[in-house]
Amino acid sequence: MKKLLLLSLLVASVTYSQQTIYLTQSEYNVLKLSNSVDPLNKYVFTDAQMSQTVHYSGGTVKNGVCNCMVPLDSTFILAMQPNDDGSSGSINLPFTFDFYGNQYDSVIINNNGNVSFLAPYVTWTANAFPDASYNMIAPFWGDVDTRGTYVIDSLGNYIGSGDGGSVWYKVTPSALIVVWDHVGYFSNHTDLVSTFQLIISNGADSLVPAGNNVSFCYDDMQWTTGDASSGVGGFFGSPATVGVNVGNGVDFFQVGQFNESGVAFDGPYGNSDQVDFLDGQEIYFNIAGAAASNTPPVLISSAICDTIDVYTGDTLIKSLPEQFEFSISAYTPEMGQTLTTSIACTAPSAFTMTATQVSTEYYRYDCIFNANSLAPGLYYVNAQSIDNGVPAASSELNLVFRVNYDQGLSVSEINNIDFEVFPNPFNDIVQIQKGGDLNIIDVEVLDISGKQVKTAKNCSSQLDLSDLQNGVYFISVYEAGKLIGTKRILKNSN
């Protein structure tokens, strides 16, 4: 896709002003359900007696590099008090974000699952991309309502309980992290909640894989559609949109549109998809510069978090009792492009694969890794995909399997391994925590190539890794001479 020179004229012509309207929550709900909300107005609820200190409702513990959710802590800032269709103020960025060649140093967080750069957006019913009306990055554009279940007081006012989740953000020297944490949907529903995250960066932050400047990350996605978008019980009606849209009708891409429960997905431009497909996924891409108008293919894998430990003499054990089945999805965000994808394993005898072309833009590869009779060591599955854009763009995905040999460790013991390494990502020091009592342990640290870079004998639960460079490592913990597990960790010192 080529950029249009008129984009700068479009941006220069945008003006924005707001009138503040004060009303009760029930009055706003009536306006919204009758499609009478004016997007140029700011609506303030007179009966929303919310605490000025709102705590996030749990957050997600990041326990591996492929678990891309960044844990919420005291360094995050509440973007907005509980609301429906609200937005943050303009947030200054200490870096320049490149959005298809447009340079931005501030951003607006919109409650409804997206961020924008030119103006806040009230719109709760998502449109498909491209759309000339919106300049946004949308990890999940849907009708988020963080007011929670409301009750009626003695005066007939609607008072929110505040259990509809929260939107949080954190600015670092090289990235902005936004987390929609356990958020509900309109109108005031909390029976289903979703957690998802957006990271935008200067292109050099290690939270986003090298060569990319945006990451979408998903925890548990439970709903798609609010009541005002013809949703029924959180589904059906107008689908939620995931993707990127400059607003000139030319520079855009779409990951998909979702309006049902389940895991079915037929590509970015097929039928509406099922939202559980997003669970546990990280989708990252580069939209910097005019060359980004041909976005590289997207490669994502299912069901893989942390280094996968396998044991000789047994098939790979993770979620299935006899073998580990997983999928790799390859698709191009641009409509009408085609892909050429190759997937190979460093242990060919352990790897089988079935390829399916689901749509023009989307291919699914169902894979099995079986470690039976493999020698101990690290093994890799590598996927490479190239599109037919001009110029062509390519992407690469590496999955890591570690085969161990321990004759004294039973299958049931392997499945019951319980230890964590945190924080992850870390700066210099990591803590090692195991379920139950942690005896004296030995620790081995390997780099991404499998080279040993550090060992520690008779280690306490704290390990100093300040001498390591930024990057991905594997940390193996041994107790009483037996390996109790391996985790993948990321050093990210700013």
Image (spheres, rainbow, N blue to C red):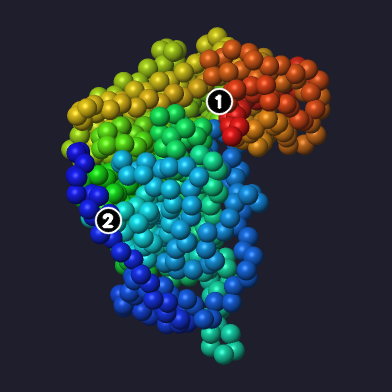
Q: Earlier in the sequence, mark 1 or mark 2?
A: 2
Q: Is the residue 110 above or below the residue 305 in the image?
A: below
Residue 230 x %, y %: 31, 67
Name the one closer to the observer, 296 or 134. Answer: 134
Q: Is residue 473 left or right of residue 367?
A: right
Name the one closer to the observer, 409 or 123. Answer: 123
Residue 359 x %, y %: 22, 38
Q: Is residue 173 left or right of residue 407?
A: left
Q: Which mark is residue 12?
A: 2
What's the amino acid at mark 1? Answer: Gly
- Residue name at image x 59 percent, y 89 percent: 154
Q: Residues within 10 Å of mark 2 (few under 14, many from 20)?
A: few
Q: State the CA–CA distance, disc 1 to disc 2.
A: 41 Å
Query: Which quadrant, please, contains the N terminus?
Result: top left
Q: Nearer the viewer, mark 1 or mark 2?
A: 2
Number of dots carrying numbers: 2
- Residue name at image x 64 percent, y 22 percent: 468
Q: Label 1: which residue? A: 471
Q: Is the residue 200 above or below the residue 490 in the image?
A: below
The quadrant holding residue 10 is: bottom left
Res 324 seen here: yes
Helix, strand or loop at disc 2?
helix
Q: Residue furthest top?
A: 375
Residue 341 x %, y %: 29, 24
